[in-house]
Image (cartoon, helix red, strand yellow):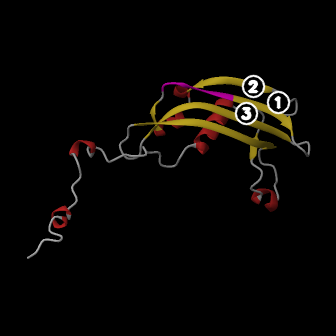
Amino acid sequence: MFARDGRVLEGELPLSQLERLHDVLASVAGVISYRIEGFRGERGEPMLQLTVSGQVQLACQRCLEAVPFELDVDSLLEVIPEGAEMSQDELEDDTRDFLPVVRELVVADFVEDEIILSLPVAPRHERCGFPGAADAGERLNPFAALDGLKGKPN
């Protein structure tokens, strides 16, 4: 109904409500913005366009400190009835993404699913050592002493 009628829904969700994200976040503070637009596709099929923006603080996989990550989700999904029969060609078509829906779509779950799909697998700082490595001082090359011997006569 939403997609067929060309409706639009916009809003914000606090990260604290998106519980499945909590394991990958360094902080659950903040909000994300979303916009869902329904329309009919070229073949008359119901479609949803979801855009999500905002910043999340992911946990670095090396040091476990916060890594700022800018969300830029833009998903186009064809709405199909849950359990709908699909041909093998439709299932293998990489140009289309499907969203099976029973009756109603839970907006927070839908937005959270798309955020999870957009996150990097192993977030980390560009230059990051392991915990405690920053306190260890400059790393010495074990061959540095040999470098001083080059060119010296015996």
- Circles 3 and 2: CB atoms closer than 8 Å: no
Q: Nearer the viewer, mark 3 or mark 2?
A: 2
Q: Earlier in the sequence, mark 3 or mark 2?
A: 2
- Circles 3 and 1: CB atoms closer than 8 Å: yes
Task: Pick the residue in front: 54 or 102.
Answer: 54
**Amino acid type at image mark 1:** Phe
Residue with the most extreme right position: 43
Q: CA distance from mark 3 to mark 2?
A: 12 Å
Residue that mark 1 sits on:
2
Q: Earlier in the sequence, mark 1 or mark 2?
A: 1
Q: Earlier in the sequence, mark 3 or mark 1?
A: 1
Residue 70 % position (x, y): 56, 35
Residue 23 located left or right of residue 144: right
Q: CA distance from mark 1 to mark 2?
A: 9 Å
Q: Quadrant of residue 103?
A: top right
Residue 85 located left or right of residue 73: right
Residue 60 % position (x, y): 42, 42
- Residue at the spot x=27%, y=46% of the render? 133
**Amino acid type at image mark 3:** Leu
- Residue at the spot x=51%, y=49% of the render? 121
Q: 125 above or below 145?
A: above
Quadrant assignment for the C terminus: bottom left
Q: Which mark is residue 105?
A: 3
- Residue at the spot x=81%, y=61% of the render? 89
**Amino acid type at image mark 2:** Leu
- Residue at the spot x=81%, y=49% of the render? 84
Q: Which mark is residue 9?
A: 2
